[in-house]
Amino acid sequence: MFPERLRALRTGQKITLTDLATGLNTMFPTDKEHENTASQIGNWERGIRNPSYIEVKKLAEFFGVSMDYLSGRVDHEESDLSKLFISGKQLFFNGEAINNNDRYEIFQLINGYLHGKQNRGDDHENQQESLDLHY
């Protein structure tokens, strides 16, 4: 499961093996002897070798997922948007960084929408609407 999840995360973000190795080495600096390489990551993706606990932890942090998700222990990730908005993590929307003022405004919009929805008694939860995100 780990090799498939790693490959899906990497290719889903259109990152090459070399880009991932460089990104990990930049995010988690170490001595030259212990730097990540494209070959090493390729071996992980093909299931030829297994990464150490430390390497899995680095990958999970790099991709913003849990180690449980990366290892296949859970099938999906859940994120509480309120915690994400108050975290120190840089947020982006369609590739554009969201600054602190916008973060607060977006949080308030979502919060107001959800509280208003409870008061409206919306009965449209079973209707699915298509959302075009222009991807």
Image: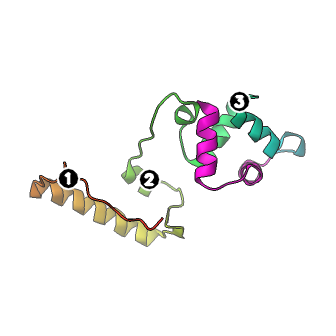
Q: Nearer the viewer, residue 101 or 109?
A: 109
Q: Earlier in the sequence, mark 1 or mark 3?
A: 3
Image depth: mark 2 or mark 1 in front = 1
Residue at x 60% of width, y 54% of height: 13
Q: In the shown orientation, is residue 60 left or right of residue 25?
A: left
Q: Name the residue carrying label 3.
A: 47
Q: Secondary structure at mark 2?
A: helix
Q: In the shown orientation, is residue 66 left or right of residue 110?
A: right
Q: Please, what is the three-letter code of the amino acid marked with disc 3?
A: Gly
Q: Taking the image as drawn, is residue 37 in sight?
A: no
Asked whether the residues under the numbered discs 1 and 3 touch, taking CB atoms below 8 Å apart as contact, a structural biologist would say no
Q: Name the residue carrying label 1.
A: 127
Callout 2: 10 Å neighbours few (<14), some, many (20+)? some
Q: Earlier in the sequence, mark 2 or mark 3?
A: 3
Q: Taking the image as drawn, is residue 55 in sight?
A: yes
Relative height, residue 75 to residue 28 (above, below)? above
Q: Would you identify the image quadrant in which residue 58 lies?
A: top right
Q: Please, what is the three-letter code of the amino acid marked with disc 1?
A: Gln
Q: Which residues are magenta?
A: 1-29
Q: Secondary structure at mark 3?
A: loop
Q: Name the residue carrying label 2.
A: 84
Q: Earlier in the sequence, mark 2 or mark 1?
A: 2
Relative height, residue 12 to residue 91 (above, below)? above
C-alpha distance separating marks 1 and 3: 42 Å
Q: Nearer the viewer, residue 50 or 114?
A: 50
Residue at x 65% of width, y 34% of height: 3
Q: Main secondary structure of the magenta part?
A: helix
Residue at x 38% of width, y 66% of height: 104
Q: In the shown orientation, is residue 116 left or right of residue 28?
A: left
C-alpha distance separating marks 2 and 1: 27 Å
